[in-house]
Amino acid sequence: MLRTGKKTIQIALTGNPNSGKTSLFNALTGLNQKVGNFPGVTVDKKVGSTQIGGHGQAKIIDLPGTYSLYPRREDEWVAYRVMMDVEKVQDLDLLLLVMDASNLKRNLLFCSQLVDLKCPVVVALTMNDLAQKKGIRIDVDELSRELNIPVVPVNPRTNKGIGELKKVISHVLSQSVSAPAPDFIDNKALAPEAVADLQALMPEVNDYLAIHYLANYKNLAFSNEKKEAIQQVDEKHHFSPNKVQAEEILQRYTRIRKIMQQFVVEPDPLQKKIFTDKLDNLLLHRVWGYVILLVVLFILFQSIFWLASYPMDAIDWGFSELTGWTASVLPEAWWSDLLCNGLLAGLGGLSFLCPRS
């Protein structure tokens, strides 16, 4: 949602590693890129700009790849802190999430978490050609309706869908007041009393942000006073981050499985298993297995003899030509006879090492 008086739109580009995020960043920003480091860390920070119709210049921040909102590595912590943005340093207007269509189930976990942050989200669905090759078909419109966020298929390598993606981003940014999407899961039920007490301290915080503040307040840029207040809530309710995280992931994947069943058609792994079983039964048969092995070995050896004849004939021809040319240009002497009929003829005779059919 746009804030009045703001000159430049701030968009964070995020997604799983190897999902096509860098390709999309390059397609959106072109040569309008700068590389530096995030404040206080050595993780690369790529920032670019692009034109969004009706909004002018937009700043694109390419965040390090991450699989979920539960960081482990330094680069994941960088992306996490930017998306939490407790000090409003980035002042993000929109999260542009890159999802790999060929690994949709894994990507939907992160997507569902971003939905529950209540920041405007637009999904760029990449790797669609790879998904088609795997036999995966996705009902993009129904998936978008189920997630309550726009989903736009793109191919950054060919710029396919980039124009449509910018139009969707412009439309989302134009909605100055929009109802946030419903929670993907019931986040408050994960720790209802702790969440309620935290929201009494920080009324602007939604249920899912409250969970993350309780879990990671020590690693976020809160003031010491606010950290002490959150710690009191944490200790009062014996908040267990690991237990809450495990329950959250379980609930998210339960719903994700239902979404996959409804809106995604994947090749049946049972059919693949049946095919490989039939292949094994044929190749490992007590009679036909040996017959197939002998045929394969026969073809292999014949191909070796057949292919070897070409370099062998080339060697014979080459030394024959070289010997004739040398004899024609050298004077008659014992040393020329030794060179032509001894050394060169001997080297040419090494072709006997090559097998003949």
Image (cartoon, rainbow, N blue to C red):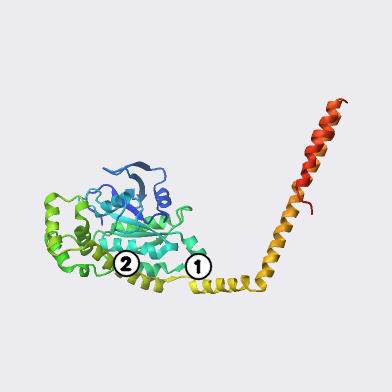
Q: Which quadrant does the C terminus fall into?
A: bottom right
Q: Position of residue 137 (x, y in %)?
A: 46, 68
Q: Which quadrant does the N terminus fall into?
A: bottom left
| In the image, residue 174 above or below residue 327 | below
Q: Secondary structure at mark 1?
A: loop
Q: Which mark is first along the chain, 2 or 1?
A: 1
Disc 1 designates what residue?
A: 135
- Gap between marks 1 and 2, in whole Å? 26 Å
Residue at horizontal 67%, vertical 69%? 290
Disc 2 designates what residue?
A: 148
Q: Position of residue 75 (x, y in %)?
A: 32, 49
Q: Position of residue 224 (x, y in %)?
A: 13, 50
Q: Position of residue 346 (x, y in %)?
A: 80, 38
For label 1, the crowd category at 10 Å Cα-Cα, with few meaning under 14, some 14 to 19 and many 20 or more, is few
Question: Observer-nearest residue: 313 or 45?
Answer: 313
Q: Secondary structure at mark 2?
A: loop
Q: Quadrant of residue 217?
A: bottom left
| In the image, residue 261 above or below residue 93 | below
Residue at horizontal 19%, vertical 67%? 191
Question: Observer-nearest residue: 69 or 47?
Answer: 69
